[in-house]
């Protein structure tokens, strides 16, 4: 039986939803694999229309979806409305990219003489993988869940999607799936274009299912490893794209504090406390100079945390995991508690926003844990050498941020050299939360932040669910439209020269 | 001790080469990781010059390299000269692509209003991974070994490379490495830009080494799985790109036989027998219609095989593995031996080119083995349904080929739908061997042909050894040149619009 829990009260209720049986998982996956073949055949522009139709349906059902998600996640009205807007926008942006067509990476090498003798005509573009399984995260019931970026990018690339409903917001998953399924049906999309399964066992069966061609996952490192282990047991391994863990170090220079200490403290407090700190890009470690400027900054930051309301976490697992990380980190050698927000009441999954502090020279890999919630570790550094050494103890992350002033240019260059190999996005005089959904975005990074060289946010997220296919000396009638000489609807590389569409 | 064996005689001799110790592997890998940082800093155009310098050095040492490779591989003068030409060309083509620069996938989204409020400035390009380990194959001592496509693409992308010398041609590896190292030194490339290790144990240590950031591999499925298992034990998993196995089905229609039976037989015999059949794209299964046309074709093909000289294989392992596969396949239910070439003498690792035959309706997954050598299985089909069913028993491959006539258009469409999900390159009225090195090439395919969605031949092979990095609100002085507004030297996506360099 599938249950739903209100994190603000802790009350759990039964739902009408049932755990999906292994046989149903297989049937849904096979339907998706068949749908994927049909989806590939309807063509690029029609697929773009489908994405627009899904976006419109999500927008139309806003009034139903928001309250459902509020009750299951404890996230606020404002936050969830913003998230749904982002989710709708994601579908629209992918639609735009599908129309634009350069994601196909069309390349045509005409037959000709090469240093190795006559070369055949070779043409290449990217084709969809098939049926993609999507495991969303608890912290974004829309933008990283059933209708999230993995689903949108997989559909945009021409795949069918089977989503695993998240156990922490099953009713939201069911509601949003109903919206999307209705949109697909009314649009006339192939039966099975999207599917959904419920229950942990069904999730395991889904990644083991031969009809599934790839998996997108956003969640914890532990769960990611468990899913990877199931994939490793398959006869045919498939790509697993995991967005797993991130500490997001943020460095502040003395010059930056001298110029705008207040502004940074306000921005940092918001970045850590908003959404109860449950963002994969939440800054977890702030590197603050020792001395008066740093002391004053930390006092200011502490005041903001002390005033902060107790923060509700998404569910019991997140709550307990956060409590464990907070306890371990606060009892590590050299760590002190600088500030705690309002104390939680007896009901629900609330915690106090917290600042811990440690000297950079005391920081060890043991301190470097991801506390998924409103906690930040202030790491006090003396100079470049202990700062750089301490940064090496922070695992690679989705982001690294730097608050600096123009005078710090040499330092910034050095610092960037230190953090560049250990991050996927470098943020300057800003905060890593609030990931812009755009063409240039990259949301990924070296292990353990993600497990591949790909992104899960932004247009290039599509690349995960595509594979190249080459045609050699193929007749026009068999070539995909975009590979025919006469078609110039998308950007193409013609005999090595990139050419724009006409 | 490292030994070398002449496959034409079977004689084994000691070499002066020593197995690389674990400590040496670590030192070489760390030197490579340091070199990679310096290589990334010398800039794109200088790196292109380095590739050209390596190409020139390989060309200059041709007279030394060819005889060494001949003695160790049994491959002919003509074949090895062609292969070295290809190897030189690969470096030159990658140099061209590095200069051209669109492999960086530069994208710039200027700050602006978005449906989610103000969006920051976000810029993205691809950066190298670090030190890449390369495991070459026995069958291409140049083009897929120490100086092969993996090495060239990894260097082009800005990585350093540590090659594992192949046990079947260690002296060739040493000679070619000396050539490349000299080129790097004379060019002034960072110390450690290329490295080499000897011995199976050193290879295992190399993929386990924390300083290594990715692995390129061309070889057997079994060895690939063993390396993957070592990677799975690492604290930080890294990308493993394996080109592993391929059966390369080839379908011939009756209409094609009616029009040009002789031509197809001649081409097919060459494609199977050349290089002693030791090509990953060798057609392993030819689907030939039943009836008189097919019978006549097979008789013609058999005559060519019967006349063929005994073929020398690369080494004892390849010989024994081929002999095992041939034995198993020829004793599978329903299989007959149609033709055998000249019998091997007592010396060396020679085998007879062989045609086996089976009815399509008798073909099971048990028949579908990769016999790495001059063997082809003729599969006789009655009509579309038993052809399509039989094709489902052939594992996914690097290629699938079709010999057809214009009248077969409907059949070709149907057939392409069957093989498209199971191949990386579709060849029409041609043969899959002789992989063109070009921009549009794709050399990869669904498992078990490769284990990822990437290619190991052609310009886009570089993508394997790059990861995206995003800069948010970064000042000009810290941005890579190609990400600055003022730089228009490479193709860029500006606010979603693809623009050509000026």
Image (cartoon, coloured by chain):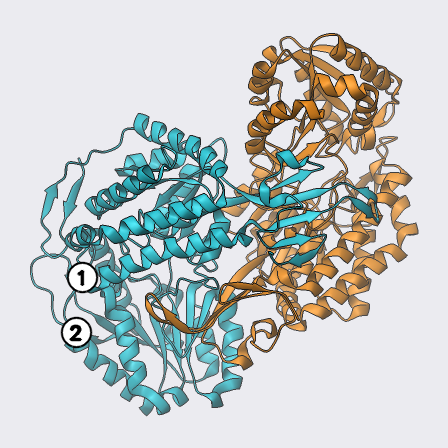
Chain colours: A cyan, B orange
The residue tagged 1 is: A77
Relative to A433, say whether B300 is above or below: above
Badge 2 density bin: few <14, some 14–19, many ≥20, Cα 10 Å: some
Q: Residues within 10 Å of mark 1 (few under 14, many from 20)?
A: few
Horizontally, residue A485 falls left or right of residue A37, namely right
Give the residue at x 33% y 31%: A25
Query: The C terminus of chain B appears in which quarter of the rendering?
Result: bottom right
Q: Distance between the residues labelled 1 and 2?
A: 19 Å
The answer to whether residue B470 is above or below residue A454 is below
Which numbered marker is on residue A308? 2
Residue nearest the viewer, comparing B188 with B362: B362
Q: Could you say whether the residue bearing mark 2 is in a helix, strand or loop?
A: loop
Q: In which quarter of the image is the N terminus of chain B?
A: top right
On screen, A14 above or below A463? above
First reached walking from the N terminus: tag 1 or tag 2: 1
* Residue A244 in view in this figure: no
Same chain, labels 1 and 2: yes
Residue B422 placed where, x, y %?
57, 31
């Amino acid at each position: 039986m599938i249950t739903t829990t209100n994190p603000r009260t802790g009350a759990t209720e039964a739902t009408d939803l049932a755990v999906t049986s292994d046989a149903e998982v297989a049937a849904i996956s096979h339907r998706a694999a068949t749908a994927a073949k049909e989806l590939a055949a309807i063509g690029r522009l029609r697929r773009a229309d489908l994405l627009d139709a899904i976006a419109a349906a999500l927008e139309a059902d806003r009034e139903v979806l928001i309250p459902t998600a509020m009750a299951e996640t404890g996230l606020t009205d404002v936050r969830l409305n913003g998230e749904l807007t982002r989710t709708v926008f994601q579908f629209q942006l992918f639609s735009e990219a599908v129309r634009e067509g350069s994601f196909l990476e069309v390349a045509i090498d005409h037959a000709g003489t090469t240093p190795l003798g006559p070369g055949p005509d070779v043409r290449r573009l990217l084709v969809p993988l098939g049926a993609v399984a999507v495991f969303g995260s608890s912290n974004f019931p829309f933008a990283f869940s059933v209708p999230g970026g993995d689903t949108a990018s997989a559909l945009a690339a021409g795949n069918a999607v089977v989503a695993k409903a998240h156990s922490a917001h099953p009713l939201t998953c069911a509601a949003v799936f109903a919206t999307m399924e209705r949109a697909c049906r009314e649009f006339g999309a192939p039966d099975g274009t999207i599917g959904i399964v419920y229950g942990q066992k069904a999730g395991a069966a889904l990644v083991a299912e031969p009809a599934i061609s790839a998996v997108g996952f956003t969640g914890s490192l532990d769960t990611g490893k468990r899913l990877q282990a199931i994939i490793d047991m398959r006869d045919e391994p498939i790509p697993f794209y995991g967005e797993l863990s991130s500490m997001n170090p943020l460095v502040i220079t003395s010059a930056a504090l001298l110029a705008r200490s207040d502004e940074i403290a306000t921005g940092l407090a918001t970045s850590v406390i908003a959404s109860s700190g449950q963002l994969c890009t939440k800054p977890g470690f702030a590197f603050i100079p020792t001395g008066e400027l740093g002391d004053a900054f930390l006092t200011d930051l502490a005041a903001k945390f002390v005033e902060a309301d107790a923060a509700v976490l998404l569910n019991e697992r997140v709550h307990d995991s956060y409590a464990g990380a907070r306890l371990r980190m606060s009892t590590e050698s050299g760590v002190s508690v600088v500030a705690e927000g309002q104390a939680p009441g007896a009901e629900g999954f609330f915690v106090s926003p917290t600042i811990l502090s440690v000297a950079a020279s005391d920081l060890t890999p043991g301190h470097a844990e991801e506390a998924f919630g409103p906690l930040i570790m202030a790491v006090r550094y003396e100079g470049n050498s202990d700062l750089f050494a301490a940064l090496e103890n922070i695992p690679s992350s989705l982001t690294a941020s730097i608050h600096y002033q123009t005078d710090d240019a040499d330092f910034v260059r050095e610092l960037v050299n230190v953090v560049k190999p250990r991050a996927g996005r470098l943020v300057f005089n800003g905060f890593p939360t609030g990931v812009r959904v755009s063409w240039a975005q990259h949301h990924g990074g070296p292990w353990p932040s993600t497990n591949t060289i790909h992104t899960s946010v932004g247009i290039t997220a599509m690349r995960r669910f595509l594979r190249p296919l080459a045609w050699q000396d193929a007749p026009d009638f068999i070539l995909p439209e975009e590979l025919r000489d006469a078609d110039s609807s998308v950007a193409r590389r013609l005999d090595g020269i990139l050419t724009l569409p006409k």
